[in-house]
Image (cartoon, grey):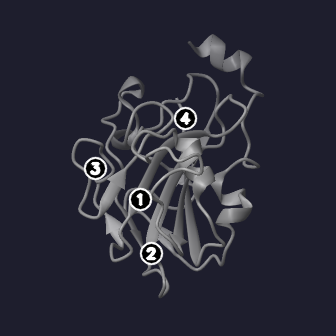
Amino acid sequence: MAIIGTILKNRRAGSAHLAWNLPALAGPETLELTSKDFSDEGTIPLAQAGKRAGGENISPELAWTAPPAGTQQLLLVIEDVDAPTAKPFVHCVALIDPSVTGVPAGGLSAAAPADGVRVLRSGMGRGYLGPEPIKGHGPHRYVFQLFAMPGVLTTTAGGSPLDEAKARAVIASATGPVLARGSLAGTYER
């Protein structure tokens, strides 16, 4: 498998297509997003990695400052900007009640999400998908992005129910500008 990683070493999605860079998700960067499990630009622990990478696929503990007044919903998007794909790979999409200011470790699980958290489809399946980069591809950067939405997402722009929609369709349906946003990045390599 390391041979494939070496062959694809220079192929990376890049940050241009991150949810963060969508015009509808632009807004003031006033939410502080942190984790006790890793620092910004720090290494994501093995427990948070996917099972194929030897991890436990447990979403990290996340905390954030209170969103501004008028926030109707929080949108959390986790993307791998170093995936060897055309766009960053979506590792999680979740809608969160605006009264929630953090999720515990494992709180982005599809089977048992934390109170106030609605996990949707990711790039494969539903809920949090831990890092599982190709062996030998080099370090991957996982960007956790949190948006304070002025409205509530109920369907995609095409009218599909959110629980059935693909991750990118949900992200594209978000309207803004957002009231606040924050990001946290972690790295993982195997």
CA gap between label 3 and label 1 equals 15 Å
CA gap between label 3 and label 4 equals 21 Å
Q: Which mark is residue 72?
A: 2
Hey, what amino acid is under mark 4?
Glu
Give the residue displayed 72% in from the left and 48% down from the top.
Answer: 15
CA gap between label 2 and label 3 equals 24 Å
Q: Quadrant of residue 28?
A: bottom right
Query: Mark 4 near mark 1, Cβ–Cβ under 8 Å?
Result: no
Circle 2: is it few (<14), some (14-19), or many (20+) Cα within 10 Å?
some
Closest to the observer: 62 or 136?
62
Q: Is residue 30 left or right of residue 33?
A: right
Hey, what amino acid is under mark 2?
Gln
Q: Which mark is residue 189?
A: 4
Give the residue displayed 53% in from the left and 47% down from the top.
Answer: 159
**Residue under label 1:** 95
Query: Mark 3 near mark 1, Cβ–Cβ under 8 Å?
Result: no
**Residue under label 3:** 106
Give the residue displayed 64% in from the left and 40% down from the top.
Answer: 88
Query: Mark 2 near mark 3, Cβ–Cβ under 8 Å?
Result: no
Q: Which mark is residue 65?
A: none
Query: Does label 3 or label 1 sit earlier along the sequence?
Result: 1
* Picture quarter with the N terminus: top right
* SS at circle 3: loop
Name the spot of residue 137 as percent of width and height, x first. 64, 26
